[in-house]
Image (spheres, helix red, strand yellow):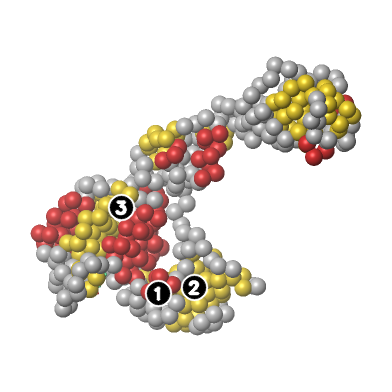
Amino acid sequence: MPSHDHEHGHHARHEGGRTVFPDLLPLDVALPQILEQIPVLEVEDKPIIDALGQVLAEDVVSTENVPPQANSAMDGFAVRGEDTPGRLKVVADQAAGHVTDKAVEPGTAIRIMTGAVMPAGADTVVPVEDTDGGLDGVVNISVKAQPMDNVREAGEDVRQGESVLPKGTALGAGMIGVLASIGRGRVKVYRRPVVAFMASGDELVGVDDRLGPGQIRNSNSYTLVCQIQQAGGIPRDLGVARDTLEDIRAHIDEGLKADLLITSAGVSVGDFDYVKRVLEEHGQLRLWRIAIRPGKPVAFGVFEGTPVISLPGNPVSSMVCFEIFVRPAIAKMMGQQRLDPATAEVTVLDPVNNRGGRRSFLRAIVSRDADGYVARLTGPQGSGILTSMARANALLDIPAEAEQVSAGSRVRAILLAPVAA
Ligand code: AMP
Ligand code: MG
Protein backbone atom coordinates (compact mmCIF):
# COMPACT_ATOMS: atom_id res chain seq x y z
CA MET A 1 0.00 0.00 0.00
CA PRO A 2 1.34 3.45 -0.87
CA SER A 3 2.26 5.55 2.14
CA HIS A 4 -0.30 8.29 1.47
CA ASP A 5 -2.92 5.65 2.17
CA HIS A 6 -1.77 5.42 5.75
CA GLU A 7 -1.37 9.13 6.08
CA HIS A 8 -5.00 9.59 5.18
CA GLY A 9 -6.14 6.58 7.21
CA HIS A 10 -8.03 5.16 4.26
CA HIS A 11 -6.83 1.57 4.33
CA ALA A 12 -9.13 -1.39 4.90
CA ARG A 13 -9.00 -3.27 8.23
CA HIS A 14 -9.85 -6.87 9.01
CA GLU A 15 -12.19 -7.60 11.88
CA GLY A 16 -13.51 -11.05 12.71
CA GLY A 17 -12.89 -12.36 9.18
CA ARG A 18 -14.66 -9.39 7.60
CA THR A 19 -13.02 -6.62 5.68
CA VAL A 20 -14.05 -3.31 7.20
CA PHE A 21 -13.83 -0.39 4.84
CA PRO A 22 -13.06 3.07 6.06
CA ASP A 23 -15.02 6.22 5.42
CA LEU A 24 -15.37 7.51 1.92
CA LEU A 25 -12.09 7.47 0.08
CA PRO A 26 -11.17 10.61 -1.89
CA LEU A 27 -10.91 10.05 -5.63
CA ASP A 28 -7.38 11.50 -5.64
CA VAL A 29 -6.35 8.64 -3.36
CA ALA A 30 -8.43 5.87 -4.95
CA LEU A 31 -7.70 6.43 -8.63
CA PRO A 32 -3.87 6.28 -8.45
CA GLN A 33 -4.16 3.14 -6.31
CA ILE A 34 -6.35 1.49 -8.90
CA LEU A 35 -4.23 2.54 -11.86
CA GLU A 36 -1.05 1.41 -10.15
CA GLN A 37 -2.42 -2.13 -10.13
CA ILE A 38 -3.52 -2.14 -13.76
CA PRO A 39 -0.95 -3.85 -15.98
CA VAL A 40 0.25 -2.67 -19.38
CA LEU A 41 -0.56 -5.53 -21.76
CA GLU A 42 1.86 -7.44 -23.95
CA VAL A 43 3.16 -6.23 -27.27
CA GLU A 44 1.81 -7.68 -30.50
CA ASP A 45 3.15 -7.39 -34.03
CA LYS A 46 0.35 -6.69 -36.47
CA PRO A 47 -0.53 -5.24 -39.88
CA ILE A 48 -0.77 -1.45 -39.71
CA ILE A 49 -4.27 -1.58 -41.20
CA ASP A 50 -5.45 -3.21 -37.96
CA ALA A 51 -3.53 -0.93 -35.59
CA LEU A 52 -5.62 2.27 -35.64
CA GLY A 53 -5.95 3.62 -32.10
CA GLN A 54 -3.29 1.34 -30.65
CA VAL A 55 -0.09 2.57 -29.07
CA LEU A 56 3.34 2.00 -30.61
CA ALA A 57 5.60 -0.24 -28.55
CA GLU A 58 8.67 0.62 -30.64
CA ASP A 59 10.41 3.69 -32.02
CA VAL A 60 9.84 3.66 -35.76
CA VAL A 61 12.89 4.67 -37.82
CA SER A 62 12.47 4.96 -41.55
CA THR A 63 14.63 2.79 -43.79
CA GLU A 64 13.47 4.74 -46.84
CA ASN A 65 13.35 8.26 -48.19
CA VAL A 66 9.89 9.69 -48.83
CA PRO A 67 9.58 10.50 -51.61
CA PRO A 68 12.18 7.98 -52.78
CA GLN A 69 13.26 10.17 -55.70
CA ALA A 70 12.88 13.82 -56.70
CA ASN A 71 9.62 14.23 -58.63
CA SER A 72 7.37 16.82 -60.12
CA ALA A 73 4.74 18.63 -58.03
CA MET A 74 2.92 19.84 -61.17
CA ASP A 75 1.87 18.84 -64.68
CA GLY A 76 4.21 20.76 -66.98
CA PHE A 77 7.68 20.62 -68.48
CA ALA A 78 10.92 19.49 -66.88
CA VAL A 79 13.64 21.86 -68.07
CA ARG A 80 16.92 23.55 -67.15
CA GLY A 81 16.09 26.80 -65.37
CA GLU A 82 18.77 28.62 -67.34
CA ASP A 83 16.90 27.80 -70.59
CA THR A 84 13.85 29.80 -69.48
CA PRO A 85 12.06 31.79 -70.71
CA GLY A 86 12.44 30.30 -74.19
CA ARG A 87 11.39 27.97 -76.95
CA LEU A 88 12.41 24.37 -76.23
CA LYS A 89 12.14 21.11 -78.10
CA VAL A 90 9.96 18.47 -76.36
CA VAL A 91 11.98 15.23 -76.50
CA ALA A 92 9.89 12.85 -74.38
CA ASP A 93 6.83 12.39 -72.13
CA GLN A 94 7.24 11.30 -68.52
CA ALA A 95 4.15 10.04 -66.63
CA ALA A 96 3.99 9.04 -62.97
CA GLY A 97 5.33 5.52 -62.56
CA HIS A 98 7.29 5.62 -65.82
CA VAL A 99 10.95 6.47 -66.31
CA THR A 100 12.22 7.71 -69.67
CA ASP A 101 15.81 7.01 -70.68
CA LYS A 102 15.92 10.46 -72.29
CA ALA A 103 17.65 13.31 -70.46
CA VAL A 104 17.00 17.03 -70.65
CA GLU A 105 19.81 18.52 -72.75
CA PRO A 106 20.31 22.26 -73.27
CA GLY A 107 17.42 23.60 -75.36
CA THR A 108 15.11 20.69 -74.66
CA ALA A 109 12.21 19.85 -72.33
CA ILE A 110 10.44 16.70 -71.20
CA ARG A 111 6.67 16.84 -70.72
CA ILE A 112 6.10 15.66 -67.13
CA MET A 113 3.08 14.70 -64.99
CA THR A 114 2.59 15.24 -61.26
CA GLY A 115 4.47 12.59 -59.31
CA ALA A 116 6.71 11.58 -62.22
CA VAL A 117 10.42 11.31 -61.44
CA MET A 118 12.61 14.28 -62.48
CA PRO A 119 14.52 13.30 -65.61
CA ALA A 120 18.29 13.58 -65.69
CA GLY A 121 19.50 17.03 -66.66
CA ALA A 122 16.37 18.92 -65.52
CA ASP A 123 16.46 21.08 -62.39
CA THR A 124 12.99 22.65 -62.46
CA VAL A 125 9.43 22.17 -63.67
CA VAL A 126 7.44 24.84 -65.51
CA PRO A 127 3.69 24.37 -64.95
CA VAL A 128 1.72 23.83 -68.14
CA GLU A 129 -0.21 27.07 -67.40
CA ASP A 130 3.01 29.05 -67.95
CA THR A 131 3.54 27.58 -71.44
CA ASP A 132 1.69 27.35 -74.74
CA GLY A 133 1.05 23.65 -74.09
CA GLY A 134 3.83 22.43 -76.36
CA LEU A 135 1.49 20.48 -78.60
CA ASP A 136 3.59 20.33 -81.80
CA GLY A 137 6.89 19.07 -80.39
CA VAL A 138 8.03 22.52 -79.32
CA VAL A 139 7.09 24.40 -76.15
CA ASN A 140 7.13 28.14 -75.60
CA ILE A 141 7.85 29.03 -71.98
CA SER A 142 6.85 32.53 -70.94
CA VAL A 143 8.32 32.66 -67.43
CA LYS A 144 11.74 32.52 -65.75
CA ALA A 145 11.95 29.26 -63.75
CA GLN A 146 14.21 28.98 -60.70
CA PRO A 147 15.97 25.68 -59.95
CA MET A 148 13.80 23.34 -57.81
CA ASP A 149 10.57 25.21 -58.55
CA ASN A 150 7.73 22.66 -58.45
CA VAL A 151 10.13 19.86 -57.60
CA ARG A 152 9.62 17.63 -54.58
CA GLU A 153 13.02 16.63 -53.25
CA ALA A 154 13.91 13.05 -52.39
CA GLY A 155 13.38 12.61 -48.62
CA GLU A 156 11.64 15.97 -48.17
CA ASP A 157 8.84 14.29 -46.18
CA VAL A 158 10.84 11.58 -44.40
CA ARG A 159 14.59 11.00 -44.56
CA GLN A 160 16.09 7.54 -44.48
CA GLY A 161 17.34 6.93 -40.92
CA GLU A 162 14.97 9.51 -39.45
CA SER A 163 12.95 8.62 -36.35
CA VAL A 164 9.39 9.22 -37.49
CA LEU A 165 7.11 7.97 -34.71
CA PRO A 166 8.27 7.47 -31.12
CA LYS A 167 7.28 4.61 -28.86
CA GLY A 168 4.11 5.57 -26.99
CA THR A 169 2.43 7.23 -29.97
CA ALA A 170 -1.28 6.45 -30.24
CA LEU A 171 -1.74 5.69 -33.92
CA GLY A 172 -4.11 7.93 -35.85
CA ALA A 173 -5.00 7.86 -39.53
CA GLY A 174 -2.14 10.17 -40.52
CA MET A 175 0.38 8.03 -38.64
CA ILE A 176 -0.85 4.82 -40.26
CA GLY A 177 -0.42 6.65 -43.57
CA VAL A 178 3.17 7.60 -42.71
CA LEU A 179 3.92 3.96 -41.81
CA ALA A 180 2.55 2.90 -45.20
CA SER A 181 4.61 5.60 -46.94
CA ILE A 182 7.86 4.31 -45.44
CA GLY A 183 7.13 0.68 -46.26
CA ARG A 184 6.33 -0.44 -42.71
CA GLY A 185 3.48 -2.90 -43.24
CA ARG A 186 3.58 -4.21 -39.65
CA VAL A 187 4.26 -2.56 -36.31
CA LYS A 188 4.65 -3.51 -32.68
CA VAL A 189 1.81 -2.16 -30.56
CA TYR A 190 0.39 -2.91 -27.12
CA ARG A 191 -2.49 -5.33 -27.37
CA ARG A 192 -6.04 -4.16 -26.77
CA PRO A 193 -7.63 -5.57 -23.61
CA VAL A 194 -10.60 -7.90 -23.77
CA VAL A 195 -12.99 -6.22 -21.35
CA ALA A 196 -15.73 -8.51 -20.07
CA PHE A 197 -18.79 -6.91 -18.54
CA MET A 198 -21.85 -8.24 -16.78
CA ALA A 199 -25.09 -6.68 -15.70
CA SER A 200 -26.79 -7.95 -12.56
CA GLY A 201 -30.25 -7.77 -11.10
CA ASP A 202 -33.51 -9.71 -11.02
CA GLU A 203 -35.37 -6.64 -12.29
CA LEU A 204 -33.60 -6.48 -15.64
CA VAL A 205 -35.17 -7.38 -18.97
CA GLY A 206 -33.88 -6.85 -22.52
CA VAL A 207 -34.69 -4.02 -24.94
CA ASP A 208 -37.14 -6.13 -26.92
CA ASP A 209 -38.76 -7.92 -23.98
CA ARG A 210 -42.20 -7.16 -22.57
CA LEU A 211 -41.91 -5.22 -19.31
CA GLY A 212 -43.44 -7.20 -16.47
CA PRO A 213 -44.30 -5.87 -13.02
CA GLY A 214 -41.25 -4.59 -11.18
CA GLN A 215 -39.03 -4.85 -14.23
CA ILE A 216 -36.84 -2.30 -15.97
CA ARG A 217 -34.78 -2.54 -19.11
CA ASN A 218 -31.08 -3.30 -18.99
CA SER A 219 -29.46 -0.16 -20.37
CA ASN A 220 -26.09 -0.52 -18.65
CA SER A 221 -24.98 -3.34 -20.94
CA TYR A 222 -25.52 -0.99 -23.88
CA THR A 223 -23.69 1.98 -22.45
CA LEU A 224 -20.87 -0.30 -21.29
CA VAL A 225 -20.34 -1.97 -24.66
CA CYS A 226 -20.18 1.47 -26.28
CA GLN A 227 -17.87 2.99 -23.71
CA ILE A 228 -15.53 -0.02 -23.80
CA GLN A 229 -15.34 0.23 -27.57
CA GLN A 230 -14.75 3.98 -27.51
CA ALA A 231 -12.00 3.50 -24.95
CA GLY A 232 -10.25 1.03 -27.26
CA GLY A 233 -11.15 -2.20 -25.46
CA ILE A 234 -12.66 -5.32 -26.99
CA PRO A 235 -16.02 -5.76 -25.27
CA ARG A 236 -17.18 -9.18 -24.17
CA ASP A 237 -20.81 -9.26 -23.02
CA LEU A 238 -21.39 -11.80 -20.27
CA GLY A 239 -25.12 -11.03 -20.16
CA VAL A 240 -27.23 -10.51 -17.08
CA ALA A 241 -26.57 -12.35 -13.83
CA ARG A 242 -29.63 -12.91 -11.65
CA ASP A 243 -29.40 -11.98 -7.98
CA THR A 244 -28.25 -15.39 -6.76
CA LEU A 245 -24.81 -16.28 -5.52
CA GLU A 246 -24.62 -19.14 -8.06
CA ASP A 247 -25.44 -17.05 -11.10
CA ILE A 248 -23.17 -14.19 -10.09
CA ARG A 249 -20.39 -16.67 -9.34
CA ALA A 250 -20.79 -18.25 -12.78
CA HIS A 251 -20.64 -14.85 -14.51
CA ILE A 252 -17.65 -13.68 -12.49
CA ASP A 253 -15.76 -16.96 -13.12
CA GLU A 254 -16.27 -16.44 -16.84
CA GLY A 255 -15.35 -12.76 -16.60
CA LEU A 256 -12.06 -13.46 -14.84
CA LYS A 257 -10.83 -15.06 -18.09
CA ALA A 258 -10.77 -11.59 -19.67
CA ASP A 259 -8.08 -8.94 -19.24
CA LEU A 260 -10.42 -6.71 -17.26
CA LEU A 261 -13.83 -7.42 -15.76
CA ILE A 262 -16.47 -4.76 -15.24
CA THR A 263 -19.44 -5.64 -13.09
CA SER A 264 -22.56 -3.53 -12.94
CA ALA A 265 -24.74 -3.08 -9.84
CA GLY A 266 -24.99 -5.34 -6.85
CA VAL A 267 -22.29 -3.59 -4.86
CA SER A 268 -24.43 -1.41 -2.65
CA VAL A 269 -25.63 -2.59 0.75
CA GLY A 270 -28.95 -4.19 -0.19
CA ASP A 271 -29.56 -7.76 1.00
CA PHE A 272 -29.64 -9.03 -2.56
CA ASP A 273 -26.37 -7.41 -3.59
CA TYR A 274 -24.09 -10.36 -4.10
CA VAL A 275 -21.38 -9.09 -6.44
CA LYS A 276 -19.28 -7.87 -3.56
CA ARG A 277 -19.73 -11.15 -1.66
CA VAL A 278 -18.72 -13.29 -4.63
CA LEU A 279 -15.69 -11.11 -5.37
CA GLU A 280 -14.59 -11.46 -1.77
CA GLU A 281 -14.60 -15.25 -2.24
CA HIS A 282 -11.82 -14.71 -4.77
CA GLY A 283 -9.67 -12.43 -2.68
CA GLN A 284 -9.60 -9.02 -1.17
CA LEU A 285 -11.57 -6.05 -2.41
CA ARG A 286 -9.11 -3.19 -2.41
CA LEU A 287 -11.45 -0.23 -2.28
CA TRP A 288 -14.99 0.24 -1.41
CA ARG A 289 -16.71 3.60 -1.15
CA ILE A 290 -15.37 6.60 -2.94
CA ALA A 291 -16.29 10.20 -2.16
CA ILE A 292 -17.78 11.10 -5.51
CA ARG A 293 -21.25 11.76 -6.80
CA PRO A 294 -22.70 10.02 -8.66
CA GLY A 295 -21.15 6.68 -7.90
CA LYS A 296 -20.22 6.23 -4.28
CA PRO A 297 -20.12 2.41 -4.32
CA VAL A 298 -17.21 1.56 -6.61
CA ALA A 299 -15.14 -1.49 -5.82
CA PHE A 300 -11.82 -2.66 -7.15
CA GLY A 301 -9.69 -5.72 -6.77
CA VAL A 302 -7.33 -7.98 -8.65
CA PHE A 303 -8.63 -11.54 -8.63
CA GLU A 304 -6.64 -14.40 -10.12
CA GLY A 305 -4.57 -11.79 -11.94
CA THR A 306 -7.57 -10.05 -13.49
CA PRO A 307 -8.43 -6.53 -12.38
CA VAL A 308 -12.11 -6.10 -11.60
CA ILE A 309 -13.88 -2.77 -11.40
CA SER A 310 -17.38 -2.88 -9.96
CA LEU A 311 -19.54 -0.02 -11.12
CA PRO A 312 -22.74 1.15 -9.47
CA GLY A 313 -26.02 0.05 -11.04
CA ASN A 314 -27.64 3.42 -11.52
CA PRO A 315 -27.30 4.17 -15.22
CA VAL A 316 -25.72 7.61 -14.82
CA SER A 317 -23.37 6.42 -12.07
CA SER A 318 -22.33 3.55 -14.28
CA MET A 319 -21.41 5.84 -17.16
CA VAL A 320 -19.74 8.51 -15.04
CA CYS A 321 -17.71 5.96 -13.07
CA PHE A 322 -16.71 4.31 -16.31
CA GLU A 323 -15.26 7.65 -17.46
CA ILE A 324 -13.45 8.17 -14.18
CA PHE A 325 -12.12 4.67 -13.45
CA VAL A 326 -12.44 2.36 -16.43
CA ARG A 327 -11.40 4.60 -19.30
CA PRO A 328 -7.96 5.37 -17.81
CA ALA A 329 -7.55 1.70 -16.83
CA ILE A 330 -8.13 0.60 -20.44
CA ALA A 331 -5.82 3.37 -21.63
CA LYS A 332 -3.07 2.13 -19.32
CA MET A 333 -3.52 -1.47 -20.49
CA MET A 334 -3.12 -0.25 -24.07
CA GLY A 335 0.14 1.50 -23.27
CA GLN A 336 -1.25 5.05 -23.44
CA GLN A 337 0.98 7.58 -21.73
CA ARG A 338 -1.77 10.09 -20.99
CA LEU A 339 -4.40 8.61 -18.73
CA ASP A 340 -6.16 11.79 -17.69
CA PRO A 341 -9.19 12.94 -19.65
CA ALA A 342 -9.42 15.93 -21.96
CA THR A 343 -10.52 18.91 -19.87
CA ALA A 344 -11.31 22.59 -20.26
CA GLU A 345 -11.87 25.48 -17.88
CA VAL A 346 -15.48 26.56 -18.30
CA THR A 347 -17.67 29.33 -16.93
CA VAL A 348 -20.86 27.97 -15.36
CA LEU A 349 -23.96 29.83 -16.46
CA ASP A 350 -26.21 28.29 -13.78
CA PRO A 351 -25.53 28.32 -10.05
CA VAL A 352 -24.61 24.82 -8.82
CA ASN A 353 -25.46 23.30 -5.44
CA ASN A 354 -23.12 20.65 -4.08
CA ARG A 355 -24.16 19.77 -0.57
CA GLY A 356 -22.94 16.53 0.96
CA GLY A 357 -19.21 17.11 0.85
CA ARG A 358 -18.51 14.89 -2.12
CA ARG A 359 -16.73 15.73 -5.34
CA SER A 360 -19.48 15.85 -7.96
CA PHE A 361 -19.48 15.23 -11.67
CA LEU A 362 -22.44 17.07 -13.11
CA ARG A 363 -23.76 16.55 -16.59
CA ALA A 364 -23.40 19.69 -18.65
CA ILE A 365 -23.55 21.08 -22.13
CA VAL A 366 -20.41 23.05 -22.86
CA SER A 367 -20.37 25.48 -25.75
CA ARG A 368 -18.19 28.35 -26.86
CA ASP A 369 -19.05 31.99 -26.67
CA ALA A 370 -16.93 35.07 -27.36
CA ASP A 371 -15.07 34.73 -24.04
CA GLY A 372 -14.40 31.00 -24.12
CA TYR A 373 -16.13 27.88 -22.88
CA VAL A 374 -19.42 28.19 -21.02
CA ALA A 375 -21.48 25.41 -19.43
CA ARG A 376 -25.13 24.80 -18.64
CA LEU A 377 -26.40 21.84 -16.66
CA THR A 378 -28.46 19.34 -18.65
CA GLY A 379 -31.30 19.52 -16.13
CA PRO A 380 -32.14 17.11 -13.30
CA GLN A 381 -28.98 15.42 -12.06
CA GLY A 382 -30.38 12.25 -10.45
CA SER A 383 -28.30 9.13 -11.00
CA GLY A 384 -31.27 7.52 -12.74
CA ILE A 385 -31.71 10.35 -15.28
CA LEU A 386 -29.90 8.70 -18.17
CA THR A 387 -31.15 11.34 -20.62
CA SER A 388 -28.72 13.71 -18.84
CA MET A 389 -25.88 11.62 -20.30
CA ALA A 390 -27.53 11.63 -23.71
CA ARG A 391 -27.59 15.45 -23.66
CA ALA A 392 -24.25 16.11 -21.99
CA ASN A 393 -20.97 16.68 -23.77
CA ALA A 394 -19.09 17.31 -20.52
CA LEU A 395 -18.94 16.56 -16.83
CA LEU A 396 -18.39 19.52 -14.51
CA ASP A 397 -15.92 18.56 -11.82
CA ILE A 398 -17.18 20.27 -8.66
CA PRO A 399 -14.76 20.04 -5.72
CA ALA A 400 -16.04 18.45 -2.50
CA GLU A 401 -15.53 21.65 -0.52
CA ALA A 402 -17.49 23.83 -2.96
CA GLU A 403 -21.01 23.79 -1.51
CA GLN A 404 -22.25 26.54 -3.76
CA VAL A 405 -20.83 27.46 -7.10
CA SER A 406 -22.29 30.75 -8.26
CA ALA A 407 -23.09 31.53 -11.87
CA GLY A 408 -20.02 33.02 -13.53
CA SER A 409 -17.55 30.81 -11.63
CA ARG A 410 -14.84 28.93 -13.46
CA VAL A 411 -14.70 25.16 -13.01
CA ARG A 412 -12.94 22.25 -14.64
CA ALA A 413 -14.95 20.22 -17.14
CA ILE A 414 -14.15 16.76 -18.46
CA LEU A 415 -14.97 16.82 -22.15
CA LEU A 416 -16.88 13.76 -23.35
CA ALA A 417 -17.62 14.89 -26.89
CA PRO A 418 -16.61 17.71 -29.21
CA VAL A 419 -17.80 21.18 -28.22
CA ALA A 420 -19.98 23.00 -30.74
CA ALA A 421 -19.06 26.59 -31.65
P1 AMP B 1 -28.00 -1.98 -7.34
O1 AMP B 1 -26.59 -1.51 -7.26
O2 AMP B 1 -28.11 -3.40 -7.76
O3 AMP B 1 -28.73 -1.67 -6.07
O4 AMP B 1 -28.69 -1.11 -8.49
C1 AMP B 1 -28.85 0.29 -8.37
C2 AMP B 1 -29.89 0.80 -9.34
O5 AMP B 1 -29.47 0.62 -10.67
C3 AMP B 1 -31.23 0.09 -9.25
O6 AMP B 1 -32.25 1.06 -9.41
C4 AMP B 1 -31.21 -0.85 -10.41
O7 AMP B 1 -32.49 -1.21 -10.87
C5 AMP B 1 -30.46 -0.06 -11.44
N1 AMP B 1 -29.79 -0.93 -12.40
C6 AMP B 1 -29.00 -1.97 -12.08
N2 AMP B 1 -28.54 -2.57 -13.17
C7 AMP B 1 -29.04 -1.90 -14.24
C8 AMP B 1 -28.90 -2.04 -15.64
N3 AMP B 1 -28.15 -3.00 -16.16
N4 AMP B 1 -29.56 -1.17 -16.43
C9 AMP B 1 -30.30 -0.19 -15.90
N5 AMP B 1 -30.46 0.01 -14.59
C10 AMP B 1 -29.84 -0.83 -13.74
MG1 MG C 1 -29.33 -4.89 -7.85
Local SS, label 3:
strand
User: Is label 2 in contact with label 3 (beta carbons under 8 Å)?
Assistant: no
Q: Is residue 235 above or below residue 344?
A: above
Mark 2 / mark 3, whichever is N-terminal:
3
Mark 1 / mark 2, whichever is N-terminal:
2
Report if the beta carbon of the residue with label 1 is closer than 8 angstroms to ligand 1.
Answer: no
Q: Is residue 93 left or right of residue 44?
A: right
- The alpha-carbon separation of the residues under discs 3 and 1 comes to 24 Å
Dot 2 amino acid type? Ile
Q: Residues within 10 Å of mark 3 (few under 14, many from 20)?
A: many
Dot 3 amino acid type? Pro
Dot 1 amino acid type? Ser
Q: Position of residue 141 (x, y in %)?
A: 86, 33
Q: Position of residue 360 (x, y in %)?
A: 41, 73
The reply to whether residue 45 is visible in this rendering is yes
Q: Could you tell me which quadrant the C terminus lies in?
A: bottom right
Q: What residue sits right under mark 2 in the picture? A: 365
The reply to whether residue 298 is visible in this rendering is no
Q: What residue sits right under mark 3 in the picture? A: 235
Q: Residues within 10 Å of mark 2 (few under 14, many from 20)?
A: many
Closer-to-camera residue (68/264): 68
Report if the beta carbon of the residue with label 2 is closer than 8 angstroms to ligand 1.
Answer: no
**Residue farthest to the front?**
136
Which residue shows up at 35% across the image and 59% down it?
226
Q: What residue sits right under mark 1 in the picture? A: 388
Closer-to-camera residue (60/184): 184
Which residue shows up at 15% across the image and 60% down it?
248
User: Is label 3 in contact with label 1 (beta carbons under 8 Å)?
Assistant: no
Which residue shows up at 46% across the image and 57% down it?
340
Local SS, label 1:
helix
Mark 3 / mark 1, whichever is N-terminal:
3
Q: Is residue 28 left or right of residue 77?
A: left
